[in-house]
Image (cartoon, rainbow, N blue to C red):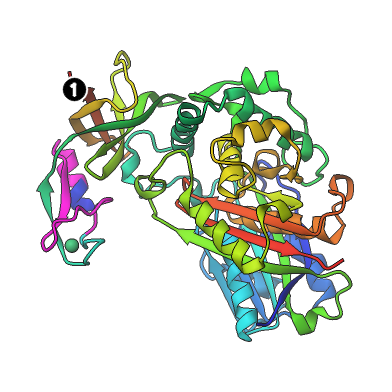
Amino acid sequence: MRRVAIAASQTARFTKTSEKSIFELACEPCIDIVKSVRDIDAVLLSTCSTEQYSSTIVSEMLGIKPKISHRIDNLCNSGTNAIASAYSMIVAGLCDSALVIGAEKSDSKGNRLVWDITRGSFNFPVHWAAMFAKAHMGRFGTTEQQMAAVSVKNRKNAAKNPNALFRKPVSLEEVMSSRRIADPIKLLDCSLACDGASAVLLLSEERAKKVENPVWINGIGQQTNSASFAGAAENLSALETASRAAHDVYRMAGVRPSDIDVAEVHDAFTILEIMAYEDLGFAKKGEGGKYAEKNEIAVNPRGGILGCGHPIGATGVSQVSEIACQLAGTAGKRQVKDCRTGLVHNLAAAGSSATVMVLGVQK
Amino acid sequence: MRQFLDYIKAGRFRVPVCTSCRTKAWPPSPYCPKCLSRTAFRKVKTTGTLLEFSSSHVRDHEGLFGVVDMDGIRLVGSFDPDASLSVGMKVRMSRCGVSDAGTPYYWFDVVK
Ligand SMILES: [Zn+2]
C-alpha cells in the first residue's frame, strides 16, 4: 500500500472572535505552505460553517487549481475525518498531494446540536459531559481534583504555545473554585468555542522523498455509533467509539499503547481526557483519574482543547498539526524529547463518533 | 420528527414503532433502524430507570436533570428541584411539552 506523509503543518493563532471571514481564517495557515509547494492536487476544508462552495472559494483565494476540492463537516470530528479522507485519496492514487484545512468561527452552528431532541431542556454539551463525569465518579471513585489536574496540566502546556487562546496557567485551587456549570463540572473544566484555523499538507510516498523529515500516517481508526446522545455510549463511563477506533488503529499501525510517546486527545471537558486515557489503553479501566495525577506521558503538549480553545472544524487538524510538529522536532518550547510515535484522538458530539490516528517518524 | 414534536406539544409522548418487527425508532424516524420498514407512532411505556443525574447552573437551563432509560428509549429528563434522586431508581414521565425555543422537555417523578 502507498504510504502517506505529512510534509508541512501550520496553525494560526486562535482568538475569542475576530472580524475575519471563514475564508480569510482558512487561508491564514496555508500561506507559507502554498508559497513553498505550488503543486497541490486536493483541497479539503473541514468546517461546520454552512457557507456554500467554501473549499473552492478558499482554493481560488490561494491560487490553487486542485483536482479535488470539497468541504467536510462532521462536527468536532471534522478535521480528523478530512485528514482520513485525504489519506485515502492519496493511497488510492486519486491525488499525490492534499492540503487539509480546518477553520471555524466562534459562533459556528456546530456548537449546538439542535437536532438532538433526546436531551430535553438540558441540551448543552456540558450536560452530557456532567453525566459522563458523574458516572465515572460513581463507578470508579474518580475525583473532582483529578479532573481539575487535567485542566492545570493543559493550561500549563498552553502557556508555552503562542497560538493558544489561554496562555495563563491556572492552579488546582482556581479550577476547583471556578463557577459551577453542571455538577461536578466547573468553568475551568470546560473548553471555549473560538475562532481558529490550522492546515496540514499530505504527500504521497514518492512526493515525500524530497521532504527532509517526513512524518508518516501509520494508521487511522474510526467509529460512529449514533448522531444523538441517546445512542452515544451504552455505558456512560466509557466511550465505545474511541476504544473501537483505538483497537483498529493499533492493529493497522502495529503498535501498542506503551509505544506512544506523545498524544493529542480530545479534552473539550476534563473528564473526556480521563476517559481517553482508558479508552486508548494508556490506563486500565477505572484508573484514568489516577493517571491524570501522575502526569507522566506527554498528553496534549499544545495545551489541548482546554488550553488552545475549540474552533470545532479546526480542532482535529490542529491536533494532527501538533503531533506532526512534535515528531518532526519543530515544536519549539513545548518540544517533547525523543518522540518517535504519536497519537491523535478526536471525538464529536458526546463521543458518538471518534477518530484515532497513529503517526510516526523513522529515526 | 415534526410529528413527534406535534405529539409532544399536545403533551403526549408517542414514539415511532416498526410496523413489521416492533422495534422502537429512537430518536424518532420514519424508518425502523433494525429492518428499515416504515414506523408508526405508538404509545410506549413511560416508566424507566434513572441512569445518572446532576444539577445544571447554566443560565436559563437551571435545574435537576438526569438520563432515563425507558426500555431502550434513553432521554434527558427534568426533575423537581426537591426530588431526592439516586442512580437506579424507578421514575415515571409526568408531563412533556415544547419550550418557546422549540426544544422538547420531559418531566419525571420518582415512582414511590
Ligand atoms: Zn423493524
Q: Exactly how many numbered labels are in the figure?
A: 1
Which residue is outermost to the top? B82
Q: Nearer the viewer, residue A34 or A131?
A: A131
Residue B22 located within the stretch drawn in magenta: yes
- For residue B92, above or below residue A277: above
Q: At numbered mark 1, what does the secondary structure look like: helix, strand or loop?
A: loop
Q: Nearer the viewer, residue A112 or A316?
A: A316
Residue A334: x %, y % from top left: 84, 45
What segment carries the magenta color? B5-29
Residue where numbered disc 1 is placed: B111
What's the residue at 67%, 51% (across, down)? A196
Which chain contains the residue that carries disc 1? B
Q: Quadrant of the C terminus of chain B?
A: top left
Could you tell whether A49 is left or right of A93 in the image? left
Q: Work out whether residue A309 can be spotted.
A: yes
- For residue A177, above or below residue B94: above
